Image (cartoon, grey):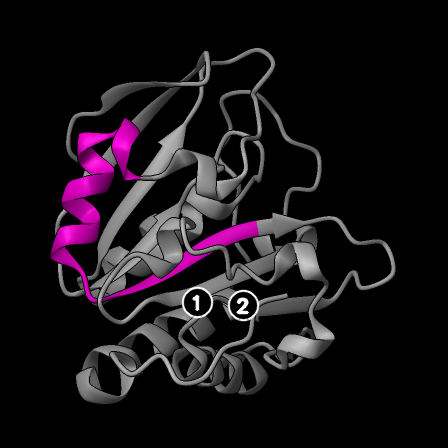
Amino acid sequence: MTSGERVVIEGAEFTAFLTPGSGIGLLALHAGTEGGTAELAELVAARTGASALVFTQPAGDPVHLPSHRMAVDHCAALREFLASVTVVVSLHGHLRRETPRAVFLGGANREAARVLGHELTVHAPDFEAVADLDAIPAGLRGLHPRNPVNLTAGAGVQVELPLAARTLRPGRVRGVPDLPPPSVAAALTAGVERLAARPRDAANPGPAVRP
């Protein structure tokens, strides 16, 4: 990855690592608190040639800020990322005990959400891909207009992954990277490749409703 940009947002310190690539962008806003999202973003971007932007935090007590509060005004790397990609695949983590195998696919680009959902069903059948907005918890739908996932021409997909879909090492060890499940990495890789091959479809967000 490129050298990091130090960013302070609402008193919390982050480092933003930007890797330029194609018009599909992998984004991990909460790598400090949602283990495995950085590794997945970097792995899928390396496999597909996509762009990637990962926010890390110093060791200690990481802070989780809502995505819409980490918008472009704070960070040159995020502004550059959003200006250079058409569709964003924003990776997040959830810990919903009632749905420990569900991968929720929110965001304003509903066609791209369906593409990723199909590839998750094919490549990672141990998980349930949920692309129906009505079936996604309101707080995980990723439809806020200031959420970076929705700030490009084609908007994007907010991928909310349970812990088992993010890492094979459920107990985080300092200094040891998370290890994403191969099936999930394969599904996201296939999905990003399909989005890159269908730029007109991928850039058409389709209908989305506010929660």
Q: Residue at x 52, y 45 (%)?
A: 36
**Residue 87 location (% of width, % of height):** 27, 67
Q: Which residue is painted at 69% across and 69% down in the image? A: 136
Residue 76, above or below 185: above
* Helix, strand or loop at mark 2: strand
Q: Is residue 192 magenta?
A: no
Residue 200 image position (x, y, % from top left): 19, 87
Mark 2 belongs to which amino acid? Answer: Gly
Going from N to C along the chain, the mark reached first, 2 or 1, is 2
Q: Are marks 2 and 1 in contact (CB under 8 Å)?
A: yes
Against 86, residue 28 (above or below) is above
Residue hosting label 2: 106
- Judge left or right: residue 183 versus residue 19: right
Q: Which mark is residue 157?
A: 1
The residue nearer to you, when weighing 45 against 27, is: 27
Dividing the picture into quadrants, the one containing residue 46 is: bottom left
Amino acid type, residue under disc 1 in the picture: Val
